[in-house]
């Protein structure tokens, strides 16, 4: 990875450790559907005019079908699932379940796109990661919390497919155009619900949480996300989930008094270790192919 890649990776790892905490705070006064509208509309109003003015929105219409598919899979459905899940489980557990994305990515990308060797190291990594997820869930969840866990399964699937779509179908499009169109489409989709389910009162803390979700976690975060996928490929980009759960757990324990369970203490390190082993880059991998394709795109753009 280049210096630019490391900077993008570090920024995204921290920025995407914030949403779980911010969502938990916002849900005190805002329902899930309205919160998604509040998260996407300001971001769209910020990004879309800039993308239009700089000519970065027009190219997306050539692949609008894939932009729409990406929007539904990465934003529209997973965000509703995750936001609703946080009404049943802690922000810490939500983040840790998202930490299983690299494990699913390793399996999905291996068997559906690039048939690269899948040796003992990756097999052991998948096993350790699966044990880690089982410990986190089994020792941290009870009763109605399983509703939140099931919702997070759908969210994890969406978060796994999103980078793959960007890498294979949208890598040649300008990031601001795709992100602006996506958050704009989601805002339009949730506008009828949000407009009829407005909260009666918003405290300063909730307003601040929504602003952070919209401008930092969504607008800035997804622009960095898109740029990072172009730089290093989809599977390696999902490795930000090594760090952002730690940020989320720290915020949840310190500021929301969420429990630091035995399952988290034992399972989280296993998820990290398993993901590292399962997603190692190798010649001919999807990330290798993505990196070469991105380099070709950049070179052709400079000619």
Image (cartoon, helix red, strand yellow):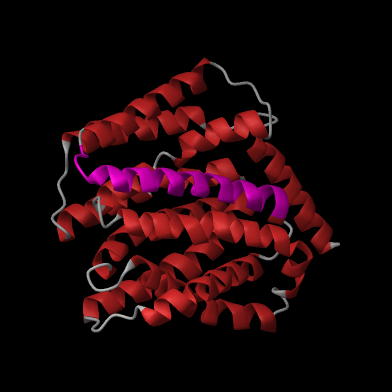
Residue placed furthest toward the top: 120
Vertical placement of residue 41 versus 172, above or below: below
Please state the horizontal and vertical placement of residue 89, each as a whole percent of the image.
25, 50
User: Closer to the camera, 2 or 200?
Assistant: 200
Residue shown at the point (33%, 81%) measured from the top left: 198
Q: How many marks?
A: 0
Residue shown at the point (28%, 80%) measured from the top left: 199
Identify the image quadrant of residue 211: bottom left
The answer to whether residue 176 is left or right of residue 194 is: right
The verdict on residue 226 being magenta is no
The verdict on residue 151 being magenta is yes
Residue shown at the point (31%, 69%) measured from the top left: 31
In the rendered image, the quadrant that contains the N terminus is: top right
Residue shown at the point (58%, 67%) measured from the top left: 182
How would you classify the magenta stretch by its main secondary structure? Answer: helix
The answer to whether residue 256 is left or right of residue 243 is: left
Q: In the rendered structure, which segment of residues is drawn in magenta?
A: 140-169
Please state the horizontal and vertical placement of residue 255, each as a whole percent of the image.
17, 61
Please state the horizontal and vertical placement of residue 141, each as a whole percent of the image.
22, 39
State whether residue 51 appears in this view.
Answer: yes
Identify the image quadrant of residue 209: bottom left
Please state the horizontal and vertical placement of residue 88, each as a whole percent of the image.
25, 52
């Amino acid at each position: 990875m280049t210096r630019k890649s490391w900077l993008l990776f570090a920024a995204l790892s921290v920025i995407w450790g914030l949403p779980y905490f911010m969502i938990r705070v916002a849900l005190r006064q805002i329902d899930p559907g309205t919160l998604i509208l509040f998260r996407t509309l300001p971001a769209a109003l910020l990004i879309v005019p800039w993308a239009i003015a700089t000519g970065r929105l027009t190219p997306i219409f050539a692949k609008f079908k894939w932009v729409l598919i990406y929007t539904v899979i990465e934003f529209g459905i997973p965000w509703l699932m995750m936001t609703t899940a946080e009404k049943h489980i802690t922000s810490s557990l939500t983040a840790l379940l998202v930490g299983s994305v690299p494990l699913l990515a390793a399996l999905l990308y291996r068997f559906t796109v690039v048939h690269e060797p899948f040796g003992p190291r990756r097999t052991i990594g998948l096993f350790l990661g699966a044990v880690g997820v089982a410990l986190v869930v089994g020792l941290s969840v009870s009763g109605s919390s399983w509703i939140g866990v099931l919702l997070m399964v759908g969210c994890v699937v969406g978060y796994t497919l999103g980078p793959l779509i960007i890498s294979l179908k949208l890598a040649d499009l300008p990031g601001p155009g795709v992100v602006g169109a996506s958050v704009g489409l989601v805002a339009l989709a949730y506008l009828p619900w949000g407009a009829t389910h407005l909260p009666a009162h918003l405290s300063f803390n909730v307003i601040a949480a929504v602003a952070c979700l919209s401008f930092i976690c969504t607008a800035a975060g997804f622009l960095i996300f898109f740029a990072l996928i172009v730089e290093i490929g989809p599977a390696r980009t999902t490795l930000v989930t090594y760090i952002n759960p730690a940020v989320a757990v720290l915020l949840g324990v310190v500021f929301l008094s969420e429990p630091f369970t035995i399952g988290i203490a034992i399972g989280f390190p296993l998820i990290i270790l398993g993901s590292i082993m399962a997603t190692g880059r190798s010649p001919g991998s999807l990330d290798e192919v993505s990196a070469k394709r991105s380099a070709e795109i950049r070179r052709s753009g400079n000619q």
